[in-house]
Image: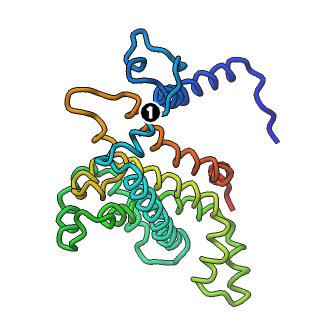
Amino acid sequence: MRKPSRNPFFWLLMAVLSITFIGPLVIMALTSFKTNVEAKQAPPTIIPHEWTLRAYRQLFVVDDASPVLSWLGNSLFAATVNALLVCLFASMAAYAFARLPLRGKNVLFALVLSTMFVPGFIFLMPNFEIMSKLQWLDTLAAIIFPGTAGAFGVFFLRQFFISLPLELEESARMDGAGPFKTFFQIVLPNARGALMTLLVLSFLGNWNDFVWPIYVLFSDSRLTLPVGLTRLQGSYTIDYPVIMAGGTVAAVPVLILYVILQRYIIEGVASSGIKG
């Protein structure tokens, strides 16, 4: 096992990066506990002089025009279902490209990868028309299904499947396992780390999506959290603690997901370079 680096510059760099990425989250969370007057003070304060839950009470109890809990539930449901479907479809396509003897699969794989170089805004109108034809506008289905067949997941898992030892699948076939049994009972359990990594990335992408939900969601009760949080900003005044409280609520589920799955994510990243 490689020993941790003793180079002081390494730890200094890690400290700077940690402050850079974690600092804004800490300041956002602390601001949510300030009064509106203190949040607008100049120079700003870091630790609140007077701790208050006013922003969270207004967010969840007082403001009926902003159903934050409904937005939170919509985002959780849509991001979870989307991430699971991405892992399912991407894993099956990636396994076919990595293992199955398909004629012309390299050309087809190159075509799939080429879609990654097309700007996403080009697909806004075609996807909108498809959602309209399916009568999915203003429903969560409109933000769940369009992104379930992306090229990145196929590319990411294909590279991992190629690194898996062929002996695992050959031994399963010798025991009489067919392609589907081999895939679901042998390949996927060994790709757990890569799948969890893709799950988190897909969840995060859907959770933070802002432009597409604005196009297809119209009712206040159907909005996702990132879109709904824009309703917290008034026309003439800005209640910074309330906005920061909304941002904190939006960040907590992602942080919890990462804490729960971090072991699998590290495992997937560490084993991605293994060759069978």
Is 203 positioned to the left or the right of 231 in the image?
A: right
Question: Residue 161 at x, y = what percent?
Answer: 59, 65
The residue indicated by pointer 1 is: 54
Q: Residue at x 66, y 19 (%)?
A: 12
Q: Nearer the viewer, residue 96 or 110?
A: 96
Question: Residue 143 at x, y = what percent?
Answer: 33, 60
Question: Residue 133 at x, y = what percent?
Answer: 18, 72
Hey, which quadrant is residue 43 in on the image?
A: top left
**Quadrant in the picture for the N terminus:** top right
Q: Nearer the viewer, residue 25 or 119?
A: 25
Secondary structure of the residue carrying numbered label 1: helix
Q: Nearer the viewer, residue 274 or 252?
A: 252
Q: Residue at x 42, y 34 (%)?
A: 55
Is 236 positioned to the left or the right of 159 in the image?
A: left
Is 243 positioned to the left or the right of 134 in the image?
A: right
Number of residues whose C-alpha sits closer than 10 Å to that of mark 1, classed few (under 14), some (14–19) or many (20 or more): some
Looking at the image, is 175 positioned above or below residue 48? below
Q: Residue at x 68, y 18 (%)?
A: 9
Looking at the image, is 276 positioned above or below residue 214? below
**Quadrant in the picture for the C terminus:** bottom right
Q: Nearer the viewer, residue 217 or 169?
A: 217
